[in-house]
Image (cartoon, rainbow, N blue to C red):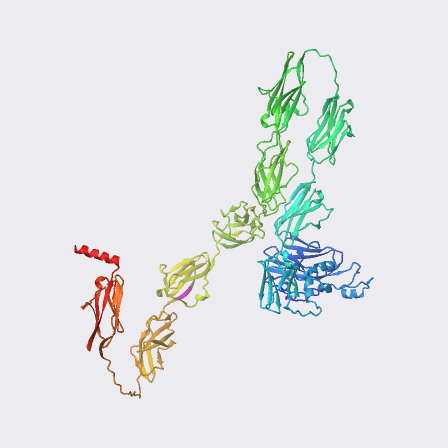
């Protein structure tokens, strides 16, 4: 295919590939229009230094294109660089109406030298640009002007002479299966171009093959999934051939079809796959013919696009896409770099069928940016946002008061289970020992001190590594003093107001957690303890809610606290010395319920406003705020929109893609934790209002209306266009009035009910699902007043002459006119007002239509249209003629006869069909045969001479009239005939003696006796001759058979037949036939026997006997 060139330039042959012929590859010509689409092309010639990177840029103008253009970078004539990996990078950037494409060759090698082409296509338009790349060594100096590499190579003195290796000689002598290995070793990247050059270069004289007339081509190329045929010709048409693939014999199948036709042998490969990319051989005895088949893959498209990610530092990120083909090559990049698979790289790549995944194990702030994925037929991108992770303290360290030899345990809980830290006492790091242990299990950090001593008292601090945060608590050492205790002591309840107590006698427990309340009891003797909820005592010692008794302690335990456990609890202790009572309020707190009624209230080009209702139950703790997530519809991956708690119930989501459907969900957060996610919102699409309508103009103005016209907005966007709103206001006012109640879908509107003489401002607003666009305004107000315009009839050119139609045809005339205010149109026929019962008339503001469904002769005449505006008028006339076939001519007669000629004359028809007679058709007929023959057609005169008449015949004539509609229905016969008399001829015939043919009747074939079965029709026949024709009489038993319908008598050229219909036994007997004429008579007879079958015969006898009795 010749390469496309810009408009206005002649198409010339593309430069041939280096070392190759300029023959085309056999591609079928395409019908793509050649246009100039490039704004910027790569330079025609580039010199690159080996080992360096080189970049080529092409820019395409898309203002005249209906869809996104497709760019291909090719080396040589066909090698698509988009399918190559590593060295060729194909990037695309989009500016308003300008597409920018890049091709980057990384670390240029000598094999990259040659001709290149960039080709852009878009539907029915295409353009291309060619350029050359030359590669020089690293030690090459700077040259001025163009470089002559052949001269440089001649002048350069190599340091060490090495024996030159002719790669082409190696290829010619190598097996086709070794081609790829040799090309890789010697740096030949264009393998298919190499094969074409190898085929066409001058080689040693080919040894004549004794088995092949024509061998296989050196190589074949086929698209994946298509069919290809390998063809060769053999010397012996009867010889058998074998087909081999990579040395293995191919068996016939539905995929491989082998055919032989004369000397031609073919191998057809159906639905080629990558497995068919191999070396093939056709073997005839000891002779072989080799070829190579290359299977080209179609462009790989991306079927599932990349999602955006919003994560915190340390999270795992997986960018996943799906492509159209398994095993396809996918390039990943983070501009301006390409992501490669290195051992030390933080990136990992995963392939699973059509799925390709880029994995970042632990995200950092350096990973923020846009990530791209390319195939040779598609591109997608996704954004990664990474935020610093904030450490949250879920449980602080509590102060401890312990006695000697007891165990002290400091415990805290943080939000990240991977965070480590150190413990300090009075600013000095605590080191582990046999008595002091430090543990880190999940999110919990513990410091355990066994056998507490007085020197262990002090301030203890936990500092997480990497965070400016510290948790502190105090360890108090309790000295035990032994005092004299009387034998009786009133009971006493010792409540610990630290720990879970948020205020005096109030305990807060998180739902689902375990509550264990150890209350120290003193008193002598040991008091009795009773726990109650309200007025109901709690006596269970087992179960979820139970009471446990220990020495000097009473334990109240709730396993898995529930909301119903909330309430007032009391503990009462009694002994003989007295009673003590304490009341506690147990408050159960939980995470809040999910927010409700998530909905989108408004959208923009890349944003959306989301509102929701607070949760019905806040979990017993005030809601601190909310966390939002969004995802694309159809995707399963949610993206966080905020990491800090958002307090309001209205949120504006940003950085979305216009035209893509999204869903939102919200989490409520209180001091306990985060709720379950809310139900997803209804899908919404970020869209922007259109730009303002363009070219708003006034089309017409009357005393109460104004007709406006405009063009569609330049920018419509993904939201489409629903319609337009037209508004107006008086000059000086600020209140705009809506003129249309429903959206106007057309680009024009008539505003009615306007006050006469007022100056009115108009504006038009485009509306879509995103809202109203900016208004399109008139530059100045419009005065509402009718503009008087003289009436003018625009009579069509074809109606300015006589308008002729045939009877029965439809007449529909549209006469346009102009004038303001609306003119009054009146029709007249022949000077009289037109009867609208006969002719239909319809008038509008701009034209008048005259309509006749079926034209008749009486519709002919002069029609006049009168157009009036007040005292002004205009007139136009139309002459309509309805025509029909004419009547026959009058008074046709033969006026003179001489020799073989006859002169005819006639008069024009009385009815000419309402148009001129264009001619006559004259026909003649011999009185003997009375067959009519046309003598003249289209004869314009009312007379003619009929010649070449036959002597001795008498002729009659008839004439047809003819006009625009055709010949008359009836001809007019001539009043007299023309007899062509014989002159001077006498026929002398020989005397003729008439032979006497009279003879008496004589039967030539007699009647024959017959025996028939009763109920079956039969016939008897005989033959007779005689002249005059004899009279035939049939008789039965000497009785003449009359007009009995049972008998049918026939006489066909003397063969006489008597048909007897369904005879019975009574029809048997003697039948005779007698022939009589005036010269005599003759008679023959026969016997007819009617047999009756035995059962029928018995029935007949039975009937006869019954009748007789």
Q: In this view, does 216 lie above or below 897?
A: above
Q: Relative to the observer, which residue lies in front, 832 or 577? A: 577
- In the displayed orientation, state which residue is furthest to the right: 159
Left or right: where 312 falls relative to 851: right
Q: Between 713 and 254, which is closer to the camera in this rendering?
A: 254
Q: In which quarter of the image is residue 932?
A: bottom left
Position above or below: 306 against 20: above
Residue 899 location in percent, x, y? Answer: 33, 85
Q: Give the range drawn in magenta.
A: 876-880
The chief SS type of the magenta part is strand
Quadrant of the image occupied by residue 268:
bottom right
105 within the magenta span: no
On screen, residue 837 above or below 398: below
Residue plotted at (67% across, 41% down): 311
Quadrant containing the N terminus is bottom right
Image-based side of 922 in relation to 174, left or right: left
| Relative side of 892 to 816, left or right | left
Residue 116 visible, this angle? no
> What's the residue at 36%, 82% (across, down)?
948
User: Residue 661's spot in the image, x, y percent?
Assistant: 58, 45
Based on the displayed image, in which of its 4 quarters is residue 365 positioned? Answer: top right
The image position of residue 353, as x and y in percent, is: 63, 49
């Amino acid at each position: 295919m010749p390469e496309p060139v810009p408009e206005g330039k002649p198409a010339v042959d593309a430069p041939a590939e280096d070392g190759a012929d300029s023959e085309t590859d056999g591609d079928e010509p395409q019908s793509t229009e050649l246009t100039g689409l490039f704004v910027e092309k790569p330079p025609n010639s580039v010199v690159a230094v080996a080992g360096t990177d080189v970049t080529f840029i092409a820019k395409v103008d898309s203002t005249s294109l209906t869809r996104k253009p497709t760019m291909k970078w090719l080396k040589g004539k066909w090698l698509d660089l988009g399918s190559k990996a590593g060295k060729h990078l194909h990037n695309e950037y989009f500016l308003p109406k300008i597409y920018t494409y890049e091709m980057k060759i990384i670390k240029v090698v000598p094999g990259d030298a040659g001709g290149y082409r960039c080709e852009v296509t878009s539907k029915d338009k295409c353009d291309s640009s060619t350029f050359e790349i030359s590669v020089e060594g690293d030690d090459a100096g700077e040259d001025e002007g163009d470089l002559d590499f052949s001269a440089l190579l001649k002048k350069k003195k190599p340091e060490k002479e090495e024996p030159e290796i002719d790669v082409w000689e190696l290829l010619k002598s190598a097996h086709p299966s070794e081609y790829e290995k040799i090309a890789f070793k010697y740096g030949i990247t264009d393998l298919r171009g190499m094969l074409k050059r190898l085929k066409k270069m001058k080689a040693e004289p080919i040894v004549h093959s004794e088995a092949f007339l024509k061998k296989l081509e050196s190589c074949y190329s086929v698209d994946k999934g298509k069919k290809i045929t390998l063809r060769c010709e053999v010397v012996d048409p009867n010889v058998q051939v074998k087909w081999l693939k990579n040395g293995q014999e191919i068996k016939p199948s539905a995929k491989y079809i082998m055919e032989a036709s004369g000397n031609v042998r073919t191998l057809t490969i159906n639905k080629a796959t990558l497995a068919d990319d191999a070396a093939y051989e056709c073997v005839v005895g000891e002779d072989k013919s080799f070829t190579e088949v290359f299977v080209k893959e179609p462009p790989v498209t991306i079927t599932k696009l990349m999602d955006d990610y919003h994560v915190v530092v340390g999270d795992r990120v997986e960018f996943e896409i799906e492509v159209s083909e398994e095993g396809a090559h996918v390039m990943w990049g983070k501009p301006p770099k390409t992501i490669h698979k290195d051992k030390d790289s933080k990136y990992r790549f995963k392939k699973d069928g059509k799925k390709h995944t880029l994995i970042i194990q632990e995200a950092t702030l350096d990973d923020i940016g846009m990530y791209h994925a390319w195939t040779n037929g598609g591109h997608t991108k996704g954004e990664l946002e990474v935020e610093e992770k904030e450490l949250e303290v879920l449980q602080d360290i509590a102060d401890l008061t312990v006695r000697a030899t007891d165990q002290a345990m400091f415990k805290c809980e943080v939000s990240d289970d991977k965070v480590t830290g150190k413990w300090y006492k009075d600013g000095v790091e605590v080191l582990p020992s046999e008595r002091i242990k430090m543990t880190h299990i999940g999110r919990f950090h513990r410091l355990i001190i066994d056998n507490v001593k007085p020197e262990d008292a002090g301030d203890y601090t936990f500092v997480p590594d990497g965070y400016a945060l510290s948790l502190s608590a105090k360890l108090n050492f309790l000295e035990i003093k032994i005092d004299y205790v009387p034998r009786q002591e009133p009971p006493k309840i010792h409540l610990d107001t630290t720990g879970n107590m948020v205020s005096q006698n109030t305990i807060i427990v998180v739902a689902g957690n375990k509550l264990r309340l150890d209350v120290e009891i003193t008193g002598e003797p040991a008091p009795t303890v009773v726990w109650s909820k309200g007025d109901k005592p709690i006596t269970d010692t087992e179960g979820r809610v139970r009471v446990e008794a220990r020495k000097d302690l009473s334990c109240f335990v709730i396993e898995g606290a529930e909301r119903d456990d909330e309430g007032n609890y009391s503990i009462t202790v009694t002994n003989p010395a007295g009673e003590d009572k304490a009341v506690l309020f147990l408050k159960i707190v939980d995470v809040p319920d999910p927010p409700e009624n998530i909905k989108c209230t408004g959208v923009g080009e890349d944003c959306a406003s989301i509102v929701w209702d607070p949760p019905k139950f806040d979990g017993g703790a005030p809601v601190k705020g909310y966390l939002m997530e969004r995802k694309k519809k159809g995707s399963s991956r949610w993206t966080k929109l905020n990491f800090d708690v958002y307090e309001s119930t209205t949120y504006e989501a940003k950085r979305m893609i216009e035209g893509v459907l999204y869903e939102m969900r919200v989490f409520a957060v209180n001091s306990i934790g985060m709720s379950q996610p809310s139900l997803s919102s209804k899908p919404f699409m970020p869209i922007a209002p259109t730009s303002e309508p363009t070219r708003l103009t006034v089309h017409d103005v009357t005393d109460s209306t104004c007709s406006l016209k405009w063009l569609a907005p330049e920018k419509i966007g993904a939201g489409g266009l629903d319609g337009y709103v037209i508004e107006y206001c008086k000059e000086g006012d600020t209140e705009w009035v809506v003129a249309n109640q429903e959206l106007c879908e057309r680009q024009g509107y008539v505003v009615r009910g306007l006050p006469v003489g007022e100056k009115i401002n108009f504006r038009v607003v485009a509306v879509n699902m995103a809202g109203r666009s900016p208004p399109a305004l008139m530059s100045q107000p419009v005065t509402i007043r009718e503009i008087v315009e003289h009436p003018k009839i625009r009579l069509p050119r074809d109606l300015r002459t006589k308008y002729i139609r045939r009877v029965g045809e439809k007449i529909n005339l549209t006469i346009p006119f102009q004038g303001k205010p609306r003119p009054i149109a009146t029709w007249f026929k022949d000077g009289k007002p037109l009867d609208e019962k006969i002719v239909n008339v319809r008038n509008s503001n701009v034209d008048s239509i005259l309509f006749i469904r079926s034209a008749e002769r009486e519709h002919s005449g002069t029609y006049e249209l009168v157009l009036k505006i007040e005292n002004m008028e205009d007139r136009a006339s139309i002459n309509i003629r309805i025509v029909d076939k004419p009547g026959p001519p009058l008074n046709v007669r033969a006026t003179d006869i001489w020799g073989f000629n006859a002169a005819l004359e006639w008069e024009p028809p009385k009815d000419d069909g309402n148009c001129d007679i264009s001619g006559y058709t004259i026909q003649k007929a011999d009185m003997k045969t009375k067959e009519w023959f046309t003598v003249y057609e289209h004869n314009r005169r009312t007379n003619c001479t009929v010649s070449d008449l036959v002597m001795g015949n008498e002729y009659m004539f008839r004439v047809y009239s003819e006009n625009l509609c055709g010949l008359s229905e009836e001809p007019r016969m001539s009043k007299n005939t023309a007899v062509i008399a014989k002159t001077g001829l006498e026929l002398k015939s020989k005397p003729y003696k008439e032979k006497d043919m009279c003879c008496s009747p004589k039967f030539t074939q007699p009647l024959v006796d017959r025996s028939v079965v009763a109920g079956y029709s039969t016939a008897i026949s005989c033959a007779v001759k005689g002249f005059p024709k004899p009279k035939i009489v049939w008789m039965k038993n000497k009785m003449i058979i009359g007009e009995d319908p049972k008998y049918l008598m026939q006489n066909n050229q003397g063969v006489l037949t008597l048909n007897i219909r369904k005879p019975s036994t009574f029809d048997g007997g003697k039948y005779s036939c007698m022939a009589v004429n005036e010269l005599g008579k003759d008679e023959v007879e026969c016997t007819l026997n009617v047999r009756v079958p035995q059962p029928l015969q018995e029935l007949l006898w039975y009937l006869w006997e019954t009748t007789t009795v």
